[in-house]
Structure formats: structure tokens, C-alpha cells
């Protein structure tokens, strides 16, 4: 049977990274079946186009995964496929949290023939076998232990995802026309892939707005160091073979949740020569350890995503995130910046203690820190979170099923001290000020002593991150953006060309010296 795994696009920007679930399920598909992967963010398709594609390919089952934010779109695609007689199974966080909705048991339309609840590593082979026999059940869920809790996959052993052989062309971040020239530059830039790797699952912290503790559990399961390193080694070899680059996003919710384990992993990565540039999510409270930060640097860590949420401790207490202390953020960022590691600092506006002006106050604080990539969202009650329950009980949900009429940056409940519209304006103000051409130039200037690649990385990352808020999917949008940021861009390009020429000159004089010496 042919199985199509589909992830709907997020409607804002081209995803920089593939979704791990597709590759994981592909690796767990029993032999004798073929899987085709389409990520709508990389390969945009309408419902009709996807249906025609599935028909032409003779697809016998479509698996769709989606977060809450994309679920309405996922349902539309599922409806179109089912109307064409192609069975659909849905999985991922949203259907796990709202199973009745996908199955039409809440009085609405049925969107899926079957749903997979929770982690599907162990149920996926069964789903395929049932689908192949035309006997799909409505619901697939993990087996239960004696206490009635889901038995979670141990992650040891972990499936082998053949990144070295997969067709990743749809995720190459280097535009087509630039590939031949860039292949010859530096270590080769003909391709650039950001690949998701998990080293563990679960989080014990239980922040009020987050689905992770409920979904993956509060005890953490780790892969073995060897299996992570083996994946890194294969990725590195692929990049070398292609004359390209690879970077890894360790998608664990808190890579340093067990500091001792992370130190051992990073030491083994270094010992195995498996360093690649990497990004990971780590909470600020775990970044005080100098030895850990040294190891992050030595193993290739470039950016750390820190869920800072708010600069107001009262807000942090409200959402059960007291372990992260706003007063410590500056020291953490400086410790990282001393090693040329920078942070993606994530903030949430619309918390109950926020008042108008929260954007200005947060921006002033951010400006006093080393530069980074600030991102701003709004407090969103995702289903099955403690936050959702609290707001529902208090009768505060303005749009209880906000995901069915998804509106970007429009809150589904009013915070206590400002309106939904004020929260929207504060968010806009923060994005505009953080990614203006002036601010981008200033961020690069503020690390003028850092080597070229860090300054270039800072500017390029800023241009991409802006796209989380401001739509920039067309060529025109990019041309406009480059024109607006031309000053720091041109000066970095000039510097880059000079460095490239100097390195070629020194290589050729070394070669002729060797020739003369008869080497
Ligand atoms: C990586 C990541 C991202 C990446 C993007 C996704 C990517 N390209 O990988 C980035 C950083 C861009 C991102 C952004 C956001 N993210 Co995010 N992200 C994650 C993260 C950390 C890892 C995802 C992952 O790969 N997990 C590992 C895989 C193996 O797990 P999985 O995806 O759940 O898949 C398993 C099962 O769910 C199931 N499954 C999944 N799909 C399917 C489909 C089928 C057919 C079947 C059978 C089974 C199945 O099988 C898999 C194996 O067991 C998760 C947290 C987490 N730990 O999962 C949050 C998470 C998914 N993100 C979340 C959110 C809210 C966001 C944002 C909206 C945040 C924001 N406010 O801006 C944005 C929106 C992005 C956008 N515009 O598209 C929430 C989603 C909650 C929800 N109910 O929707 C999560 C769960 C984190 C949280 N705090 O609660 N995210
Ligand atoms: S926000 Fe991060 S630290 Fe808090 S529960 Fe979710 S994954 Fe854990």
C-alpha cells in the first residue's frame, strides 16, 4: 500500500525545518509499504491538488498531523481526501487533546476515518496493517500500564531515520539558482538543511499554558548517546558528500533537563568528532553552569531558544513558571554571548498582569542585553492545558474553539488588565521595533568584535525570523527586505568576498610553495 504523510502549511512562512513525526512514522512503517512525504510548508498544494496527487499515485491511506494552530486547515484537506474515497488517519497533539472533534462525535462533521492518540510509535504499524485490510478502527491508543497510564515508547532502541539517503530537496534552504556557485564556497554551501533530532521526550515542569507535560508525560525518556551520535555522523557525512551544510535542531523541550546526561552527550559528541552547528531549547535556570555552556560551545551549539515569557515575575508565577527568573536573564545571555552563542528569546504578551506599554517595557529590557532573536506570541489557551481549564471555569473564553476560526495574533480570551485589541497592538509594536532595518544593523554592530560568520549569521537569522510575523513568502517581499537592509548586508558581503579571496590566495601560494619544495 502507498501511504501519504501530509503536514498542512502554517500559512505564515515557509518552514525552515521538516516535521520529525513524518520521518519517524516513515521509519516505523512495516516493510512492503511505500511512504510519500509532503510538507505543505515546503511544497504548497491546494486541497484539489493534493487529492489529484493522491489519486495519481494510487495512495491507499493518508496520515495527517497538525498542531492546534493548523487543525482547521488539516480538517479541510482530510474532508477533501475522504470525499474522494481515500481513507484518512489523523494524529498529533490536537487530535489527542480533542479526539471527538476529528471523529465528529461532538455533533460536528467527521474529518478522519481513524485517529491516533498520543505517541504513535507503537500504534503506527497496527494502523497500517488494519488500513491495508480495509479494517481501520476509529481510535488507536497506546497500551495502558497497571495504573491505567499510557505506556510510552522508551526511545531505546530508537528507529533509524535514514537522513543520509532521504530526498530532502524540498527542505533545501539554498535557492535553486544560487546552488552551483555556492557549492564551491567555503566548506560548500550548495545545500543547507536544518534537521530535527530528538534526544529525549517529556518535561516535568508543567507550565500552565503548555501541552507537553500532559502529552509526553512528566518523566523523561532519553535515547542512548550512541544513537544520537550515530545520527549526527550520518548527517555530517551527507553534507560533505553534497558539498553542503547541515544544522541540527534538537527539538527536546528542554535539552538540559538532566544536566549530567547532557554533559555526557556533548562530551561524547566532541570525542566522536560529530559536532555540527546546533540549536536547542533550554530554560534559563539551567544555563548558569559554566562547564555546560563551554560544552555547548565546543560541541557546535550556536543558538539557544529560551522561553522567557515575561519580564514580570508576577506573570511567571501566574503561569506556574517561577523556576525561570527574569532577573537572571541578562547574566545568562551574557554568559552565552561570551562564547558567541546567541539566544532566541521568546515572550508571551496578554498575561493577566500585563498592561498597555508591556511591549515598550520588554523592548527596553531586551535592548540592554546582548543581541538575539526575540519572538513574541500571545497567551493561548490550548485545549487540555491547565490554562484552558482555568479560563473556561472562570467563563473567560471569548472563543472557546478558537482553532476552528483561527485568527493570527488575536487572543481567544481577554487578559485582566488590557483588551484583546491592545494585546494585538502590543505584539505588533514589539515585532516592528525588534526587526526594523535600524535594529538589525544595530544588532550586527553590537557584536562587531565577533568573527565574520557570527555577524553574518545574526543578520541572516534576523531576516528569516522576521518572517514569523510579517508574511514574506514572495520573491518581491524578499527583494524589498534586502533593499531595506542593504547597508549591513553589503558591508558583510564585501568583507566575505575579501576573506574568500584572501583564503584562495593563501591556498594557492601554499600550493606553489609545496610545488617548489618538491612535496
Ligand atoms: C519543533 C517544534 C516546533 C517547530 C516547528 C515544527 C517543526 N518543523 O518541527 C517550530 C520551532 C517552528 C515551532 C513553532 C511553533 N510551535 Co511548536 N513545537 C515543536 C516541538 C518542540 C517538537 C515537535 C516534535 O517534532 N516533536 C517530536 C515528535 C516525535 O512528536 P509529535 O510531533 O507529537 O509526533 C508524535 C505524535 O504526536 C504522533 N503524531 C504526530 N503527527 C501524527 C500524524 C499521524 C497521521 C499519526 C498517526 C501520528 C502522529 O506520532 C509522533 C510519534 O509518536 C513541540 C513540542 C514537542 N515536544 O513535541 C512543539 C509544539 C508542537 N509546538 C507548539 C506550538 C504552540 C507552536 C507555536 C504555535 C508557538 C507559537 N506561539 O508561535 C509555533 C507555531 C508554528 C507555526 N507557525 O507553524 C505546541 C503545540 C500545541 C498544540 N496543541 O498545538 C507544542 C506541542 C509545544 C507546546 N508548548 O505545547 N514548533
Ligand atoms: S513550557 Fe517548556 S518548561 Fe514549561 S512545561 Fe512546556 S516544555 Fe516544559
Image (spheres, rainbow, N blue to C red):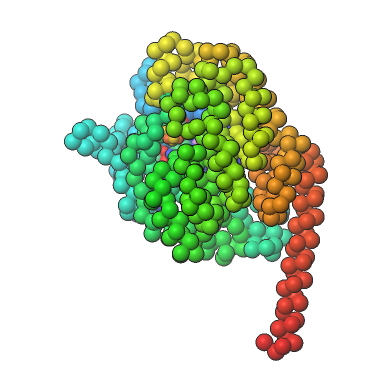
Determine if residue 365 is in view: yes
Question: Residue 506, position in %: x, y?
Answer: 75, 72
Q: Is residue 116 left or right of residue 283?
A: left
> Quarter-wise, where is residue 96 in the image?
top left
Residue name at image x 39 percent, y 46 percent: 258
> Quarter-wise, where is residue 157 in the image?
bottom left
Residue name at image x 47 percent, y 14 percent: 397
- Tell which residue pokes out farthest to the left in this image: 146
Residue name at image x 81 percent, y 44 percent: 487
Q: Nearer the viewer, residue 371 or 148?
A: 371
- Tell which residue pokes out farthest to the top in this image: 395
Q: Is residue 249 left or right of residue 157?
A: right
Question: Residue 388, position in %: x, y?
Answer: 42, 20
Q: Nearer the viewer, residue 245 or 99?
A: 245
Question: Looking at the image, how many numbered discs can be counted on the residues?
Answer: 0
Q: Is residue 136 left or right of residue 492?
A: left
Question: Residue 261, position in %: x, y?
Answer: 38, 51
Question: Residue 12, position in %: x, y?
Answer: 61, 33
Q: Quadrant of the C terminus?
A: bottom right
> Quarter-wise, where is residue 42 in the image?
top right
Determine if residue 8 is in view: no
Residue name at image x 61 percent, y 49 percent: 338
Q: Nearer the viewer, residue 298 or 249?
A: 298
Amino acid at each position: 500500500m502507498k501511504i501519504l504523510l501530509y503536514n498542512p502549511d502554517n500559512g505564515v512562512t515557509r518552514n525552515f525545518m521538516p516535521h520529525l513525526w513524518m520521518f519517524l512514522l516513515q521509519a516505523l512503517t512495516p516493510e512492503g509499504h511505500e511512504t510519500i512525504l509532503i510538507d505543505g510548508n515546503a511544497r504548497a498544494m491546494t486541497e484539489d491538488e493534493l487529492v489529484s496527487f493522491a489519486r495519481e499515485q494510487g495512495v491507499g491511506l493518508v496520515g495527517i498531523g497538525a498542531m492546534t494552530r493548523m487543525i482547521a486547515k488539516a480538517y479541510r484537506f482530510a474532508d477533501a481526501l475522504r470525499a474522494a474515497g481515500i481513507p484518512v488517519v489523523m494524529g498529533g497533539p490536537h487530535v489527542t487533546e480533542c479526539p471527538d472533534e476529528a471523529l465528529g462525535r461532538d455533533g460536528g462533521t467527521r474529518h478522519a476515518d481513524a485517529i491516533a492518540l498520543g505517541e504513535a510509535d507503537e500504534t503506527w504499524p497496527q494502523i497500517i496493517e488494519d488500513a491495508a485490510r480495509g479494517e481501520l478502527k476509529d481510535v488507536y491508543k497506546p497500551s495502558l500500564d497497571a495504573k491505567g497510564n499510557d505506556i510510552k515508547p522508551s526511545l531505546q532502541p530508537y528507529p533509524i531515520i535514514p537522513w543520509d539517503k532521504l530526498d530532502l530537496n524540498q527542505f533545501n534552504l539554498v535557492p535553486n539558482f544560487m546552488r552551483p556557485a555556492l557549492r564551491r564556497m567555503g566548506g560548500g554551501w550548495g545545500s543547507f538543511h536544518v534537521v530535527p533530532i530528538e534526544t529525549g521526550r517529556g518535561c516535568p515542569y508543567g507550565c500552565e499554558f503548555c501541552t507537553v507535560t500532559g502529552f509526553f508525560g512528566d518523566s523523561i525518556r532519553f535515547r542512548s548517546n550512541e544513537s544520537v551520535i550515530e545520527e549526527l555522523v550520518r548527517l555530517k557525512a551527507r553534507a560533505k558528500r553534497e558539498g553542503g551544510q547541515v544544522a541540527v535542531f534538537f527539538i527536546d523541550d528542554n535539552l538540559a533537563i538532566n544536566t549530567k546526561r547532557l554533559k555526557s552527550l556533548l562530551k561524547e559528541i566532541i570525542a566522536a568528532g560529530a559536532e555540527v552547528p546546533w540549536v536547542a531549547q533550554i530554560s534559563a535556570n539551567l544555563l548558569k553552569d559554566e562547564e555546560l555552556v563551554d560544552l555547548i560551545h565546543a560541541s557546535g551549539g550556536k543558538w539557544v531558544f529560551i522561553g522567557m515569557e515575561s519580564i514580570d515575575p508576577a506573570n511567571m508565577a501566574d503561569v506556574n513558571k517561577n523556576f525561570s527568573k527574569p532577573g537572571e536573564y541578562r547574566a545568562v545571555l551574557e554568559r552565552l554571548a561570551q562564547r558567541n552563542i546567541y539566544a532566541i528569546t521568546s515572550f508571551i504578551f496578554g498575561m493577566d498582569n500585563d498592561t498597555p506599554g508591556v511591549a515598550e517595557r520588554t523592548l527596553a529590557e531586551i535592548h540592554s542585553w546582548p543581541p538575539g532573536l526575540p519572538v513574541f506570541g500571545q497567551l493561548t489557551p490550548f485545549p487540555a492545558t491547565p490554562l484552558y481549564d482555568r479560563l473556561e471555569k472562570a467563563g473567560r473564553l471569548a472563543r472557546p474553539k478558537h482553532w476552528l476560526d483561527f485568527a493570527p495574533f488575536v487572543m481567544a480570551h481577554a487578559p485582566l488588565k488590557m483588551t484583546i485589541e491592545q494585546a494585538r497592538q502590543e505584539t505588533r509594536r514589539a515585532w516592528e521595533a525588534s526587526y526594523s532595518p535600524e535594529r538589525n544593523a544595530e544588532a550586527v554592530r553590537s557584536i562587531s568584535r565577533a568573527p565574520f560568520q557570527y555577524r553574518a549569521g545574526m543578520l541572516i537569522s534576523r531576516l528569516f525570523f522576521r518572517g514569523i510575523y510579517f508574511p514574506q513568502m514572495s520573491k518581491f517581499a524578499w527583494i524589498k527586505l534586502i533593499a531595506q537592509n542593504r547597508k549591513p548586508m553589503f558591508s558583510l558581503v564585501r568583507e566575505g568576498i575579501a576573506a574568500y579571496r584572501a583564503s584562495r590566495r593563501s591556498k594557492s601560494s601554499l600550493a606553489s610553495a609545496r610545488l617548489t619544495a618538491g612535496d
